[in-house]
Amino acid sequence: MRRAGLTLLITVLAVVFAGARAGAAEPDSGRAGTSESTRRDPVASFFDDILTRPTLLGDDWFFADKGLTFNIDLTQITQGVVSGGTDASWQYGGRGNVLANLDTQKFGLWPGGFFTVEIEWNFGDSVDASTGALVPANTNQIFPVPPGDKLGVPNLSFAQFLSPYAGVTVGKFDTMSGDMNEFAHGKGDKQFMNTALSINPVALMVPYSTLGAGVIVLPTKDPSHAIVNALVVSATGDANTAGFDDLASDNLLFSVEGRVRTDFFGLTGHQTVGGFYSNRKYVSLDQRLGFVIQDRALRPTQDTWAVFYNFDQYLYEIDKDAGRGLGIFGRFGASEGDPNPAEYMLSIGFGGKGPLAQRPHDRFGVGYYYIFMNEPKLQLPFTTRTFLRDEWGVEVFYNFAITPWMLLTPDIQVIGPAQIRRTNGKSVDLATILGLRLQLIF
């Protein structure tokens, strides 16, 4: 564990708890005696509700009433492989994210237009290379580009609705907004840290940030009830490059996804189904060593495809409007199995949002995933070697809201990794990973 990570966590927590105690110790009578000038002091008023408001800086700093909104957060994770895997070590890293949205109608321009700009950067390192797993145990650290010290613009897009039911969109897209799930989604900053419980691994052939265009359909006018997206994007892309050099007719990816809200037994749920096809030439994972030596190139494979499905379903709703309650989730996916070795995938879990009346901002989750590998092989002169096996994992987290804008999350993962052997020939054993995450929402 790096000292910088511990120092920052301890310092911030000490300041917050000290502020909480100071606020609790202040009697109401003292506040009543405060002068009118003090009550109107902007500096003093800034601290009045600092422990209860949803963001550290408060909504007054931005221009939501004018159609311009900002979401800014900083997520830090200290995490270690305490047994098994390929290397027992601790790492510390983090990621900052700035997301700006502009509603052209509210801004006094034309109706139906929406601009989105996202900037993010990461720093430090993660344990992803030490677990032996195919999918990262620390999703937060792989964006915008792993392992760290990277700055990128994953989203710079524009959407224009032509009617209440349909619109078009163009630009550079952050594709992690797809495969949405109420209890298991995101970039490892709010819910599960493991990528396999945040997005379907069979869809990881889709570039995280890429240029493209598409259509948006809202069957009921309300995107929270039903939405269909169809996109044509570049099959290669990067959050820290423009991407125009990669645009070509033989380097495209076609995707479609639909999500609908359900109300089984009067409880909120969602069903999502989607898929993609790419005509790009990929490098095959099944290789003959002789071919590699003779041609000094890995054998290419043409095209790839995948389909995926996920659901979430509340079993008990505490506050339907606020999205608080307990529920289950699950995913299933299938791919060609080459070049992506994740041929089939399934996951299931149980989660909660605001599970206690006294703690409306807490979250928790318990999840399990299993990836059926295509088990690619290296064909050597006298033997054939398999270097991947099926992978599975379990993760448990509790997102403790110290304040609504400061979230501390203990996390544990146990992974049966896909990697069979280390570089020194020793076997890769069951990995146990402990982690602590701190997110600040500005």
Image: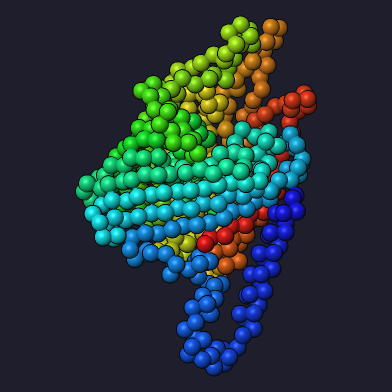
The residue most toward the left is 163
How far across and down, in percent of the image, does residue 96 sit? 55, 52
Q: Report the coloring of the rendering.
A: rainbow
How many marks overall? 0
- Frontmost residue, 190 versus 246: 246
- Frontmost residue, 377 versus 298: 298
Q: Is residue 393 visible?
A: no
Q: Residue at point 61% right, 50% down? A: 94
Q: Is residue 400 visible?
A: yes
How far across and down, in percent of the image, does residue 414 sit? 68, 42
Q: Is residue 30 left or right of residue 305?
A: right
Q: In this picture, is 13 found above or below 116?
A: below
Q: Residue at point 69% right, 64% down? A: 11
Q: In this picture, is 293 found above or below 167?
A: above
Q: Residue at point 46% right, 57% down? A: 71
- Frontmost residue, 417 versus 53: 53
How far across and down, in percent of the image, does residue 359 sit? 56, 68
Q: Residue at point 57% right, 13% down? A: 297
How far across and down, in percent of the image, does residue 191 sit? 55, 52
